[in-house]
Image: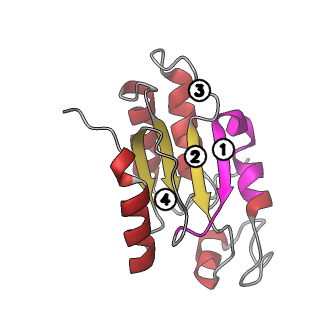
């Protein structure tokens, strides 16, 4: 499957390596704004190589509106998705398709991050590509960051 991505190969490589070599599985991986899943796939691929993480099922929690915005067209120009979606269309189906090899590792949330809540479970890693407004920053910091684990 073609790797439709708004992230660089270096970012994908970092996420894969981090998941393979650093994560312990003691907390969740939370990804804000996964778009079509390039970093979701990288994290999941790394997890499959991590011998320390025993229970990988639904370890990655992803949050996105999954609504098409005009700026996304630049990332799909010349691909099978060029011109497929109009502004506001849901593209969750494409995200699910892109992560299908790793879907058992991912719990997908169609979400408004301005109001989303977190249940207090430990978070080992936050991957963020959704801070597009102050209200999203304020809410995710207050809801998710208190559960972020530290080395201390």
The residue at which mark 4 appears reads as 7
Q: Is residue 80 above or below residue 15?
A: below
* Horizontal arrangement in the rendering, residue 81 relative to residue 111 (left or right): right
The residue at which mark 1 appears reads as 107
* Horizontal arrangement in the rendering, residue 122 relative to residue 79 (left or right): left
The residue at which mark 3 appears reads as 56
x and y percent of residue 81 in the render?
A: 76, 68
Question: Whole-Å distance between the Cαs marked 3 and 1?
Answer: 11 Å
Which image quadrant is residue 60 in? top right
Few, some or many residues within 10 Å of mark 3 (<14, 14–19, 20+): some
Which image quadrant is residue 56 in? top right
Residue 61 is marked as 2
Q: Nearer the viewer, mark 3 or mark 4?
A: 3
Earlier in the chain: of badge 2 and badge 4, it is: 4
Magenta region, residue range? 94-113
Q: Is residue 47 above or below residue 54?
A: below
Q: Circle 2 — which element?
A: strand
x and y percent of residue 13 in the render?
A: 43, 42
């Amino acid at each position: 499957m073609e790797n439709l991505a708004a992230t660089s190969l270096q970012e994908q490589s970092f996420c894969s390596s981090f998941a393979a070599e650093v994560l312990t599985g003691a907390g969740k991986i939370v990804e804000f704004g996964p778009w079509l899943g390039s970093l979701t796939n990288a994290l999941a691929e790394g997890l499959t190589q991590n011998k320390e993480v025993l229970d990988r099922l639904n370890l990655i929690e992803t949050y996105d509106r999954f609504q098409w915005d005009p700026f996304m067209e630049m990332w799909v120009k010349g691909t099978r998705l060029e011109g497929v979606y109009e502004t506001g269309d849901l593209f969750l189906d494409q995200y699910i398709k892109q992560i299908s090899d790793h879907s058992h590792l991912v719990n997908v949330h169609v979400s408004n991050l301005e109001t989303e809540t977190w249940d207090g479970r430990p978070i080992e890693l936050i991957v963020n590509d959704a801070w597009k407004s102050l209200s999203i920053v304020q809410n995710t910091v207050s809801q998710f960051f208190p559960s972020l684990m530290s080395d201390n």
